Image (cartoon, helix red, strand yellow):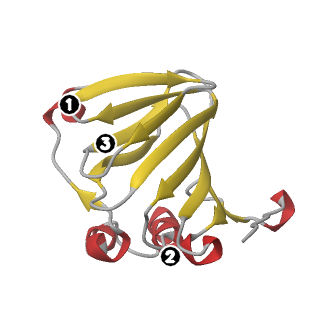
Amino acid sequence: MTVLIRAAEAEVLSASGVTLFADVPDTNGHLTSHRSIFKPGKEGAPPHQHKEASELFFVLAGSLRVLTGDDIIVLGQGDFLVVPPNTPHAFEAAGTEDTEVLFVLTHAKPRFEYYRLLERAYRGEVDFAELAATSDLYDNHYVESTAWSRR
């Protein structure tokens, strides 16, 4: 199954900086993918893990600070990272310029509704606590991280 998403056709969630490309139903269960643009100092995601999915990060521009397990690393333009299932991770823009990242999750549950819910939270239409209530539905389980809170 070939999947083609033209830039002009991709759904853009402007408040959260997310562009949706292809979700699990579109790829016959194989993957979900989106692009995010983070302003300097903007947290992309608090510490969480996926029980089923691996998450791939490819930095298109800028730099990204990433928690993976207990380690914090900084990815630059062109860097590629795969975080396996059950690995706590978090990320945020690092540096003084916008950071643009392509994300791909494999063995994932459909996630586009999660990003739409996140968009509504950024707009103040729903409380961020509603995201935590969807952890099993979207395989996005928030965790505590001493390393991330000390950064």
* Residue drawn at x 25%, y 61% as measured from the top left: 141
Q: Disc 2 and disc 3: Cα gap in Å? A: 21 Å
What is the x, y in percent for residue 83? Answer: 37, 42
Q: Is residue 49 left or right of residue 3?
A: left
Q: Is residue 46 above or below residue 81?
A: below
* Residue drawn at x 59%, y 75% as measured from the top left: 28
Please state which amino acid type lies under the numbered disc 2: Glu
Secondary element at image label 2: helix
Tell me which label, 2 or 3, sits earlier in the chain.
3
Tell me which label, 1 or 2, sits earlier in the chain.
1
Q: How many marks?
A: 3
Q: Is residue 25 above or below residue 34?
A: below
Tell me which label, 3 or 1, sits earlier in the chain.
1
Q: Is residue 121 above or below residue 88?
A: below
Please state which amino acid type lies under the numbered disc 3: His
Please state which amino acid type lies under the numbered disc 1: Asp
Q: Disc 1 and disc 2: Cα gap in Å? A: 29 Å
Q: CB of mark 3 within 8 Å of CB of mark 1?
A: no
Read off the residue under disc 1.
70
Read off the residue under disc 2.
113
Q: Is residue 18 left or right of residue 49?
A: right
- Of 24 and 46, nearer the camera is 24
What is the x, y in percent for residue 116? Answer: 53, 72
